[in-house]
């Protein structure tokens, strides 16, 4: 019986992963949000972006993928996604839920096993990105809009999902001088 439940749950998660971002006029507006650990990074450096959700009613499943655009040269690459299950404000709280991270396409999702969750604000995941060694300029980082990002109600019906404002990250390949000042006269 336990294996049957696991199989059905994984099947539901895979089914959710294959769905797309859908819009329905009568649903509440749920919005993905992003917040960066820092706004300025050096070329080659790693940083994190927290992904959250606000204004959510009857959430049963979610999936998201990140995007990074802009810059003068180089790239920002997603190198890891960690679901924030240990945080007190996690999207599914302490309820029984399954989550998965697709490391091939760097997308993540979670399915609540029973019922739904409604909240004003909640944490979803922490995404680690790395600037390439040749990266410079101003980049925009956010949840990607499209078939890889979606929300589902407890009955798997699509929910309207909006994407909040981009996080702006400035990347510089210049290293700040860290040399100590020499004292004169010695």
Image: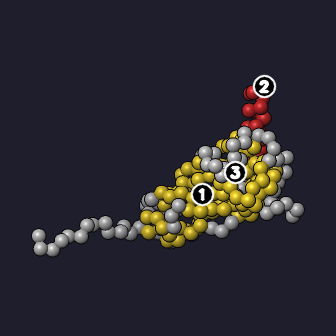
| Residue at the top extreme of this rendering | 1
Residue 40 in view (yes/no): yes
Residue 145 in view (yes/no): no
Front of the two marks 3 and 1: 3
**Secondary structure type for disc 1:** strand
- Measured in 3D between alpha carbons, the distance from the residue under mark 3 to the one under mark 1, in whole angstroms, is 12 Å
Q: Earlier in the sequence, mark 1 or mark 2?
A: 2
Residue beneath label 3, please? 91
Q: Earlier in the sequence, mark 2 or mark 3?
A: 2
- Residue drawn 18% across and 71% down? 183
Disc 1 crowd rating (10 Å Cα; few below 14, some 14-19, many 20+) is: many
**Secondary structure type for disc 2:** loop
Picture coordinates of residue 159 (x, y %)?
81, 56
In which quadrant of the rendered view does residue 21 lie?
bottom right
Marks 2 & 3, CB-CB < 8 Å contact: no
Q: Is residue 44 left or right of residue 8?
A: left
Residue beneath label 1, please? 50
Mark carried by residue 73 = none
Q: Is residue 68 left or right of residue 3?
A: left
With respect to residue 18, does 37 lie above or below? Answer: below
**Secondary structure type for disc 3:** loop
Front of the two marks 2 and 3: 3
Q: Earlier in the sequence, mark 3 or mark 1?
A: 1
Residue beneath label 2, please? 1
């Amino acid at each position: 019986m336990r294996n049957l439940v696991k199989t059905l749950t994984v099947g539901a998660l895979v089914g959710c992963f294959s769905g797309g971002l859908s819009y329905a006029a009568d649903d509440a507006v749920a919005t993905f949000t992003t917040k960066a650990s820092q706004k300025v990074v050096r070329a080659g450096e790693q940083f994190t972006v927290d992904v959250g959700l606000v204004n959510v009613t009857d959430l049963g499943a979610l999936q998201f993928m990140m995007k990074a655009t802009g810059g003068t040269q180089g790239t920002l690459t997603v190198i890891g996604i960690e679901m924030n299950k240990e945080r007190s404000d996690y999207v599914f709280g302490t309820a029984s839920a399954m989550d998965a991270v697709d490391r091939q396409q760097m997308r993540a999702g979670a399915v609540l096993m029973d019922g739904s969750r409604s909240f004003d604000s909640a944490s979803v995941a922490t995404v680690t990105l790395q600037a390439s060694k040749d990266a410079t300029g101003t980049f925009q980082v956010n949840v990607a809009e499209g078939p890889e990002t979606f929300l589902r109600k407890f009955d798997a019906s699509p929910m309207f999902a909006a994407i909040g404002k981009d996080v702006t990250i400035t990347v510089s390949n210049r290293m700040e001088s860290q040399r100590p000042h020499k004292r004169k006269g010695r």
